[in-house]
Amino acid sequence: MKTYKMLLSLIMGGMLTTSCISDFLDLDPLDSQTEAIYFKTLADFQYVANDLHTNVWAWNGNDTYGINFDYGTDLILNGADYISGTNSAPTSDKYWDKAYEWLRKVNILISKGEKYSNQEEIAGPIGQAYFFRAWHHFFLLKRYGGVPIANQVTTISTDDPVVWGPRASRYEVVKQILDDLDIAIAKLARTTVASTGNDGHVTLEAAKALKARVCLFEGTWDKYVGTKTDGDGNKNGAGISKPADYPSVEEFLTMAKNLSKDIIDSQTFELWKGVENVSSISSVKNPDMYAHCSYYYLFNLEGTDSNPAGLDKSSNKESIFRSVYDAVNRKSNTNLTHTAPAGMTRKLMDMYLCTDGLPVHLSPNFKGYTVMNAELENRDYRLTACVRPAMSYNWGWGKYNTGAQYDVDIYSLAAAQYQSVPNLRNAGPGTGGRKYCSELNSLGEAGHEAMDYMHIRYSEILLIYAEAVCELGGGNISDADLDYSINKVRERAGVAPLNAALIAKANSLGGQLDFLGEIRRERALELYGEGSRLNDLCRWGIAEAELAGENRCGAYLEYEGTDSYLKTLINPIDNKPVYEPSGYVGKINEKEIRYSYAGLTSTKPGAIIVEQAANRKFTLKNYLLPIPTDQIKLNPQILQNPQW
């Protein structure tokens, strides 16, 4: 099979490495050195462990788009066939192949470590290897369910269980992940944020954070999905075999709660609030345009010229695990600014609350949709930071070579390059989003962005704690626990705290809000465009309801009988309308769309359709992706997932 061929080439060719930043930048290729002579000192082991840090999906060119940006979900404008439910089983799958290629490298390091005379000396790099073994297995679990477990160095032997064996059940894979993370946590006791300077190396805190993520994921999957996607392991799927000591739902959720609490109580991390108010910096012109934009700049941090506060990556105490990039040695090679990969759907824009903590359909502070930029008033800062108001001036709007000069009055510059004018002449969605869109002045061409890729952030830990506590509480959570966790995230967003009084107020206005629904909303808003949405909808057991049978929409062209400003707006640059009606024939939503959580604002008639309901065919089978057929042909013991 393809995995076998790939593994054979690695076995015969020796270990391969790439380069990485700081410790990850200066690696020499190992392909001229054999394993037998290389693993002799701590430096040798750390050298190889550094390479493992580059073997994750971060900024990976075109391969990034399919997995990291929530494409095709209810939140993001760009589509994806596997979320629309129109895909078929592929012959091959690079994500499957790469995971096993990277796992072999991990297992080589672990196996060499077992033979080293001083185990304590190499505990750090070996702990990092166990972390990555868990990381890659978790990646495979989320995509395919049960998979062959790669916990030893693969060989060309015909009895190698990874190359020729059957799939392990999802429960056996989860047990392997938990065991590996427990070993990682023990071995990383002295490899911490403090000892590494949070420089991108995997640390004790990162291992705890990943385990918390795994426990919340699998605890809620067990609760809401159970065995529905497993298959019987005889005709299809990976089966339902569970290890004798497999955790219960309550035990999973309790571990998630306790691990996240441990990280919170350590006070090691903090939410990044670097660009809230820059009016005191005399050199910054037009400081009001940057107010409360920390969330946007967090995802574009590079050097001191990447934001008006003059902060660089060292100021980021929010990142727990990140892949490190550099404008000279390791660019992203991903077309981020030009493609704007995190454009927002109508549903997502309406999920953002008003500053009083109420949804737009309940809040007296909401100003409506039809007047230009009115819907951005009195709203969550994450929305206003990541959406360019119509007709506003913005750095980088003309893309490359129009980046920020914070000491220059932007309104003195050419409108054609800096003014954000809506364009509905080519059947566009009318909405957008600038998360991951750099305004760095030195950005010369596509793929030269070099912000770090943050795999785990502190805000997620706060969200994990709140969700786990609420699940354990049967849908209830105390105001104290909310203040301890999720309300810290809402505070940065400028939104009133979630508490019992707010829920009561909303429901007195005719809303149907509850704590679990609001915690799930918060997770969607904080982590949008970061690759977690599909997994969240699936583990909550609501993916079919959210992803099938309804139009995905963009901006309103009219709302409850009143035309939007977009229909009459004139582009001041060419003095022509921004809207061309012929592009929207058959592309205007004609019915109200309600969502599985009644607390969300429904989408009314009049919104632009970006994907027709007829193309939205997601079902239970789509909770797991199909196994690539070349694997099954070459190893018949691997069974396809149910219904594929």
Image (spheres, grey):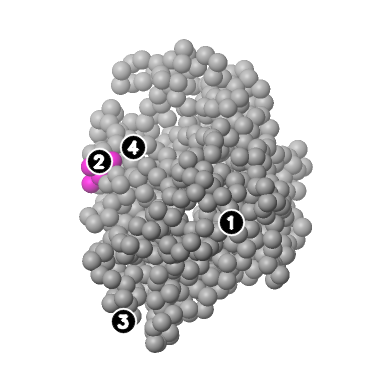
Of discs 3 and 2, which sits in the foreground?
3
Of discs 1 and 4, which sits in the foreground?
1
Label 4 to label 2, Cα distance in Å?
A: 9 Å
Picture quadrant where residue 500 is located: bottom right
From the image, tell me which residue sits under label 3.
41
Of discs 3 and 4, which sits in the foreground?
3
From the image, tell me which residue sits under label 1.
167
Q: In the picture provided, is 67 more to the left or to the right than 520? A: left
From the image, tell me which residue sits under label 2.
445
Q: Residue at x 54, y 39 (%)?
A: 89
Q: Is residue 329 magenta?
A: no
Q: In this orientation, which residue lies closer to the viewer: 4 or 412? A: 4
**Residue 304 visible in the snapshot:** no
What is the crowding at mark 4: few (fewer than 14 residues within 10 Å), some, or many (at least 20)?
some
Label 3 to label 4, Cα distance in Å?
A: 45 Å
Name the N-terminal-most of marks 1 and 2.
1
Q: Name the kind of residue labelled 1 in the image.
A: Arg
What is the crowding at mark 2: few (fewer than 14 residues within 10 Å), some, or many (at least 20)?
some
x and y percentages locating residue 280 in the rendered image = 34, 55
Name the N-terminal-most of marks 3 and 2.
3
From the image, tell me which residue sits under label 4.
338
Please, which residue is most extreme toward the bottom here? 117
x and y percentages locating residue 291 in the rendered image = 42, 48
| Main secondary structure of the magenta stretch | loop
The kind of secondary structure element at disc 4 is helix
Name the N-terminal-most of marks 4 and 2.
4
> Which stretch did the figure color magenta?
442-446
Q: Residue at x 62, y 63 (%)?
A: 172
Against 348, is 229 above or below? below
Q: Residue at x 46, y 43 (%)?
A: 92
